[in-house]
Amino acid sequence: MRTGLGVGSIRQSFLENLFYLMGRFPEVATPHDLYMALAYTVRDRLLLRWVNSSATYLQTRARTVCYLSAEFMLGPQLGVNLVNLGIRAEVAEALSELGLDLDELLEREEEPGLGNGGLGRLAACYLDSLATLQIPAIGYGIRYEFGIFDQTIEDGWQVEIADNWLRLGNPWEIPRPEIGFEVGLGGYVDHESESGRFRAVWKPERTVRGVACDTPILGYRVNTANFLRLWRAEAHEALDIRSFNQGDYTRAVEQKVSSETISKVLYPNDEALAGKRLRLSQQYFMVSCTLRDMLRIFQQADHDVRGFADKYVLQLNDTHPSVAVAELMRLLVDVHDLTWDEAWAVTTKTFAYTNHTLLPEALERWPVSLFSELLPRHIEIIYEINRRFLEEVRKRFPGDEARIRRMSLIDESGERSVRMAHLAVVASFAVNGVAALHSELLRHDVLGDFYEMWPEKFLNVTNGVTPRRFLIEANPGLASLLCGRIGNNWAKDLSELKRLEPFEHDPELRAAFRATKLDNKKRFAALLKDRLGVVVDPRSLFDVQAKRIHEYKRQHLNLLHTITLFNRLRRGQTAGITPRTVIFAGKAAPGYRMAKLIIRLVHGVAEAVAADPIARQSLSVVFFPDFNVKNAQRLYPAADLSEQISTAGKEASGTGNMKFMMNGALTIGTLDGANVEILEEVGKESFFLFGMTTDEVKRRWAEGYDPRAIYRSDPELAEAIDQIASGVFSRGDREVFAPLVNELLGRDSYMVLGDYADYVRCQADVSAAYTDEERWTTMALRNVARSGKFSSDRSIREYVEKIWKVSTTPVALALLPEEVVEIDDILPTRRPPGLDPL
Ligand code: NBG
């Protein structure tokens, strides 16, 4: 049978799919054919669960979470689906009976990298947890034809390669060509009066069609399969026949191409996006399709849209989808004929907003001119929301015009712009940060005025990550060690990992734990050798910084320490230095010059260290290119030390820190983001803490921070910076790193020099601890045992309780494929005939 979970049934399905879907027989099949046949085999089993989930949701009319996000960094699907279905061993056996190797097929998968970093990966972890916790949910986003670029390195510089992830087809996706919406852009608004009632009619200049592409998302060992619905842009018609008839074929083709451009490419972050018309078009495109799809599904059972917020809660993942506020108002007022007040009541019960950044330059703003040109009706709506909102502010705080200017949805200083975060806060019933410290800073700094006005709206939900992908799939060695000791309940309830603590001193466990880590390190070392030709010592301390390259994350602070070690080794000051492999991984935004320079410097330092016969005995520096989900799964399990060294107050949460911790790495970090909570869980003895606190950072700025004075007073620091400036790491070229040196000695916006001395001090503690194998083992074990809080299951439970108020809706496999033919079986009897399915 096509959905059976036994070895025989899997083997049979695999061969059938190879034959019927790929048109191959085993002897001539390519590795890609084999991968596809296997993916379809697994997908068949997901579909059974998906159909049953949809049926259950329809029947129970379940309240549903819609997670709206411009990014979902899903990563490869085959492996996690095997883990979640619980058939990895069966599949491996079925394949081996055919002479095939599961691991080789897993390697073939191109990952959907539809995100930049933490924010997009968080959305993917949350989908996994929502399904695992059996919560009815839909993820909504954009199906970018090109996701985040692939990174290669040439002469130490990052070179971006287009991520053509769909080239070989995507077996996980089910296109739904009949679920689609025309999305308007540009044009003007007619104001008509219809039997005494004012009515705005938007006459868009052009329309683009958004078509649904669905990916099933299965929970861990449950029957719940939710889905991610991504919108793909299509030209309105294949070709504009009128232009064609007039002989202007090229114009017709151009229009088709420009419409389809909307979902063409994911924007890399950290670039100046404010003026990018295409980016705003993407955001609106995603939002309009999503809201209309939700209304469509809603109206299958209910006719009064005033009840919309009872059926749905819509979580805004950062401000990227926040134009949804204006779009929902437009749909309710202009299309569904609600009054403004009725529509606003629905809107403010529907939305909740998560903020993911404190960096002022990352808070989205759109020039009013661009906004009005692209979305003329929406700017009117935003002005009206603003007018009513500011009236309320004036009532609460009479005479405080400075406050009005600060809080307005429109920034009037300089070029007028729409403040998307303010729009999101005003319309949402809940606003949350992503770690305790971050939420606190939102309340008192970034959104302080709003907190004063509506303290009850503000809350915290600390981020989490899915242990299914980042522990079970990524680190099978550690996972099976854990199962041997404490059973396997932790996979669903990660707080159970603390049951490991009573065994902390058990020599057998400790030895096995160390052996697993060494094994992972050896495997990673082999990968480095294979890919980069670099040889590293698996017994050395694997000191890893893996995340987007950004000045606030301070990869250059790590480099200054590395250079310091290099200099000490060359001088023969070897006392207390433990052999180390310093590993960097991460992408720089293509337009972010300083970040690219930092990558160049990593390579320069790596080269200098490798060339030095003394230093290279105890130090090596590696840049591991193309950090994506697949590579991340290889790297976390091999790490001993996790670098979380952002300037305090800059990193909203971090989630890599949690993935490292789960895999038994110790953190060296500042009191920033979720590091604060990691420290709270593991205690000072199992965490390497250094650096200024948020308050100290503020105070130092206020006192007049002077990086040059620090440079002058610290000879080792001065030596390192002088070497960078004088070409030691650039084969004598004194120009190339000048911008970096000038920034550090000039403004030093992220206080790299201010934290240098304490960081170097702390790294010496790390070396000492690593030399003491028993001490290190205790610390590392404790990190694993206390990582339970950082499961995304815990985060999702908090969202459910504090914000979403949705219920668990278990799914039974009541419908088996042959019965599904009777479509009536899965439809609620109340449902009028002829309506679209979910
Ligand atoms: C990022 C933060 C991280 C955080 C993730 C997920 C953005 C805008 N923010 O610290 O920088 O872990 O969001 O919340 O990408």
Image: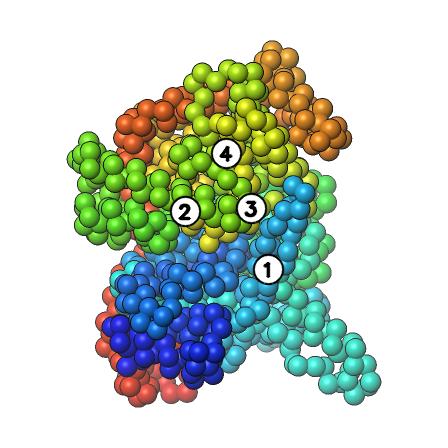
In front of the other: label 3 or label 1?
3
Label 4 to label 2: alpha-carbon separation? 17 Å
Q: Residue at x 31, y 74 (%)?
A: 10
Label 4 to label 3: alpha-carbon separation? 15 Å
User: Callout 4: helix, strand or loop?
Assistant: strand
Q: Residues within 10 Å of mark 1 (few under 14, many from 20)?
A: many
Q: Which residue is mark 3?
A: 532
Residue 163's label in the rendered image is: 1
Label 3 to label 2: alpha-carbon separation? 14 Å
Viewer-nearest residue: 737 or 476: 476
Q: Amino acid at mark 2?
A: Arg
User: Callout 1: helix, strand or loop?
Assistant: loop
Q: Amino acid at mark 4?
A: Val
Q: Earlier in the sequence, mark 3 or mark 1?
A: 1
Q: Which residue is mark 4?
A: 582
Q: Which residue is mark 2?
A: 523
In front of the other: label 4 or label 3?
3
Marks 3,2: beta carbons within 8 A? no
Q: Amino acid at mark 3?
A: Leu
